[in-house]
Amino acid sequence: MSQIEAYRTAYPKSAKWKDEALRVAGAKMSAIGNVSVRIKQIQADGAEKAGLDAAAILVELKRLAHSDIAGITDEKGRVKLPHELDPATRASIASFKIDEYGRIEYKFWPKTQAIDMAMKHLGLFKEDNKQKGTGAAEFLASLQSNVLGVVKDRPKEDDDE
């Protein structure tokens, strides 16, 4: 159950509380050491019972992130039927419709969402993993004390004559 539902179950007097108050109380409760450990244990047990495997889920995420719309057509440009699609293309399709004329309309899962999830998993979001930025602003700031600016009348050296 959600943190709100769990808090209401554990503390029946909170049944009339607003959801925002329950969200805060639930978050505080889940941050307590032994409660946090128990939550992780329940989640792991649930994932095991459901047959969820982290590696398999990452494979599916990779399929979505690397999906290619070209997989819905054959070499002649004909739109394939669902059973003719390769596994990667099938995994990237959220739904399909076949109209009364036999035309197929595919709807794909949002690829950008899959890429965002993959980037978060890989720690590529600065704010998500608090890694030190190495962007242009930091580079320019590091050079600031070393930049002299434009020198107008540079004195000639003996070799320049």
Image: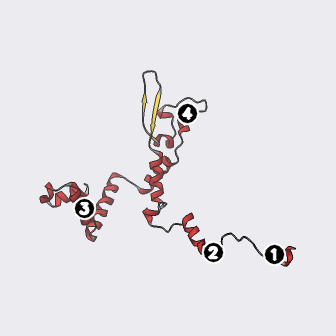
Instruction: Give the CA separation, mark 4 to mark 1.
Output: 70 Å
The picture places residue 104, in percent across and down from the top left corner, at 47, 29
On residue 146, the disc is 2
Tally of marks:
4
Q: Residue at x 81, y 75 (%)?
A: 156
Residue identified by numbered label 4: 73
The amino acid type found where label 1 is placed reads Lys
Horizontally, residue 28 falls left or right of residue 126, namely left
Q: Residue at x 17, y 61 (%)?
A: 10
Element type where label 2 sits in the image: helix
Residue identified by numbered label 1: 156
The picture places residue 49, in percent across and down from the top left corner, at 32, 54
Along the line of sight, which residue is nearer the eye, 87 or 147? 147
Binning the other alpha carbons within 10 Å of mark 3 as few (below 14), some (14 to 19) or many (20 upward) gives: few
Residue 63 shows in this picture: yes
Horizontally, residue 57 falls left or right of residue 38, namely right
The amino acid type found where label 4 is placed reads Thr
